[in-house]
């Protein structure tokens, strides 16, 4: 990992799954990384899976049905084990083969798609888990490096025009349309890339959360390359 990554107060590093799910977020730390250097040929798995639409969910039986080399089989066992660990923990992991996500280009002054820096929100105490096995990996930034877009005066003014309703309902309008989840990163900020093979836990905005939610974004995919992503 880069010095920027390892030196960040935002990120805690662990070396087992039990540490990943059992450690508490605190202070500025709202991202935990189970640091791993994975063996196996994940490219072979991606090459042999069939993508049916822009986002294709891959099930364990789809992986098991693949005829793979020894290196490909090693990669498959890692993925199946990750899925099982998360399921046994009580999460609902999904393995996705991604061509791209849907873009939100309805408004030219604010975007609400996952390529925009954003936080996740949940009504219950939960966290986001993700691991990129192949392809471009997600980015995060610290909460001091970004500002809620709805607080930027020119964006807020345009959102008020869009709302065109009673002022006391404006904040609910922002939440109902997910505008308040999105952030503008400050100039000259270098996001931290989450890399390949590491299993991450990111803090989510929910009533019992003790830290700020983790600001993150999906990457622009590499030309002609799919992503293989575990997320829950």
Image: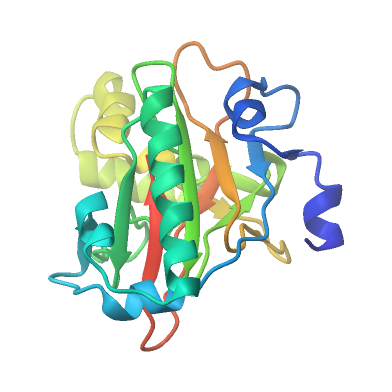
The answer, for residue 229, to whether it is visible in the render is yes
Looking at this view, name the residue that lies furthest to the top: 208
Where is residue 94? Give x, y as percent: 30, 46
| The image quarter in which residue 93 lies | top left
The quarter of the rendered structure image containing the C terminus is top left
Which one is in front, 98 or 58? Answer: 58
- Is residue 185 shown left or right of residue 151? right
In the image, 58 versus 183, the foreground residue is 58
State left or right for residue 160 relative to residue 210: left
Residue at 32% across, 53% down: 95
Q: 85 left or right of 124?
A: right
* Quadrant of the frame with the N terminus: bottom right
x then y, percent, for residue 116 = 43, 58
Residue nearest the viewer, comparing 124 with 154: 124
- The structure residue drawn at horizontal position 30% and vertical position 67%, both measured from the top left corner, is 98
Tell me: residue 135, above or below residue 145: below
Quarter location, residue 213: top right
Tell me residue 8's x, y (percent).
81, 46
Image coordinates for residue 23, horizontal then vertical, percent: 67, 22
């Amino acid at each position: 990992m880069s010095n920027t990554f390892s030196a960040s107060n935002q990120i805690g590093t662990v070396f087992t799954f039990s540490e990943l799910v059992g450690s508490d977020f605190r202070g500025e730390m709202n991202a935990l990384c189970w640091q791993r250097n994975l063996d196996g040929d994940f490219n072979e798995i991606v090459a042999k899976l069939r993508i049916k639409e822009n986002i294709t969910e891959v099930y364990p039986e789809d992986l098991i049905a693949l005829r793979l080399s020894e290196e490909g089989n090693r990669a498959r066992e890692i993925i199946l084990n990750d899925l099982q660990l998360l399921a046994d923990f009580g999460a609902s992991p999904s393995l996705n083969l991604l061509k791209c996500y849907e873009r939100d280009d309805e408004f030219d002054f604010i975007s609400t798609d996952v390529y925009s820096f954003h936080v996740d929100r949940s009504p219950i105490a939960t966290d986001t888990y993700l691991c990129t096995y192949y392809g471009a990996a997600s980015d995060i930034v610290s909460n001091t490096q970004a500002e809620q877009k709805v607080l930027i005066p020119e964006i807020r003014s345009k959102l008020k025009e869009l709302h065109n309703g009673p002022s006391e309902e404006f904040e609910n309008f922002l939440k109902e349309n997910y505008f308040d989840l999105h952030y503008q990163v400050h100039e000259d900020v270098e996001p931290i890339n989450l890399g390949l093979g590491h299993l991450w836990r990111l803090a989510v905005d929910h009533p019992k959360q003790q830290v700020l939610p983790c600001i993150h974004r999906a990457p622009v995919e590499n030309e002609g390359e799919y992503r293989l992503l575990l997320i829950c």
